[in-house]
Image (cartoon, grey):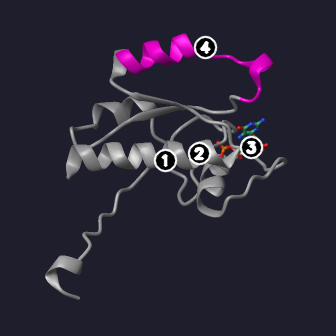
């Protein structure tokens, strides 16, 4: 491969944090395999380890090499909505987050959401 043909490779880690049953596993399944499990059991703890962290700990250990996005999932369940877009926007502004509304029944917005996060990480770090 000539110098011009070399493609830079980057590895970014994305950690999904949230209450049990909010849809983290399905977000990942949608992104990685384009699958959705309507009757999946919610994940308790963490899929690959059992350590739990307070969300505040995560925020205080953040530095400028960390991008935080807030995903409001299950946006298809309009009637059962618990957090308004306005509340999400307020959190976004107060904590310097990056707000995304997702809906794991539909794959297109999930891929867009993750691509947007990756682009933002690239813009910050590269
Ligand atoms: P986790 O514990 O955060 O990993 O949550 P899961 O991914 O296991 O999802 C918990 C439940 O919510 C499962 O029954 C999913 O089928 C359901 N679920 C996940 N995302 C959505 C969504 O966007 N819309 C709806 N209606 N249900 C969802």
* Horizontal and vertical percent position of residue 14: 43, 51
* Horizontal and vertical percent position of residue 117: 41, 44
Around disc 2, counting alpha carbons within 10 Å, would you say few (fewer than 14), some (14 to 19), or many (20 or more)? Answer: many
Cβ–Cβ under 8 Å for marks 3 and 4 = no
Residue at the (62%, 16%) spot, across then down: 83
* Horizontal and vertical percent position of residue 47: 59, 56
Q: Is mark 1 within 8 Å of ligand 1?
A: no
What SS does tag 2 mark? helix
User: Please, what is the dominant secondary structure of the magenta stretch?
Assistant: helix
The residue tagged 2 is 110
Q: CA distance from mark 3 to mark 2?
A: 9 Å
Query: Over which residues does the magenta segment extend?
Result: 76-93
What SS does tag 3 mark? loop
Around disc 1, counting alpha carbons within 10 Å, would you say few (fewer than 14), some (14 to 19), or many (20 or more)? Answer: some
Residue at the (61%, 34%) spot, across then down: 19
Q: Is mark 3 within 8 Å of ligand 1?
A: yes
The residue tagged 3 is 105
Q: Quadrant of ligand 1?
A: top right
The residue tagged 4 is 84
């Amino acid at each position: 491969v000539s110098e011009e043909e070399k493609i830079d490779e980057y590895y970014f880690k994305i950690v999904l944090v949230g209450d049990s049953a909010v849809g983290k596993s399905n977000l990942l399944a949608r992104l990685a395999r384009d699958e959705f499990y309507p009757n999946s059991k919610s994940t308790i703890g963490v899929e690959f380890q059992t350590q739990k962290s307070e969300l505040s700990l995560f925020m205080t250990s953040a530095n400028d090499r960390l991008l935080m996005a807030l995903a409001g999932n299950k946006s298809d369940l309009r009637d059962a909505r618990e957090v308004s877009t306005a509340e999400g926007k307020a959190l976004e502004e107060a904590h310097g987050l990056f707000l995304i509304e997702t809906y794991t029944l539909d794959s297109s917005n999930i891929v867009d959401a993750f691509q947007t996060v990756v682009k933002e990480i690239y813009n910050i770090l590269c």
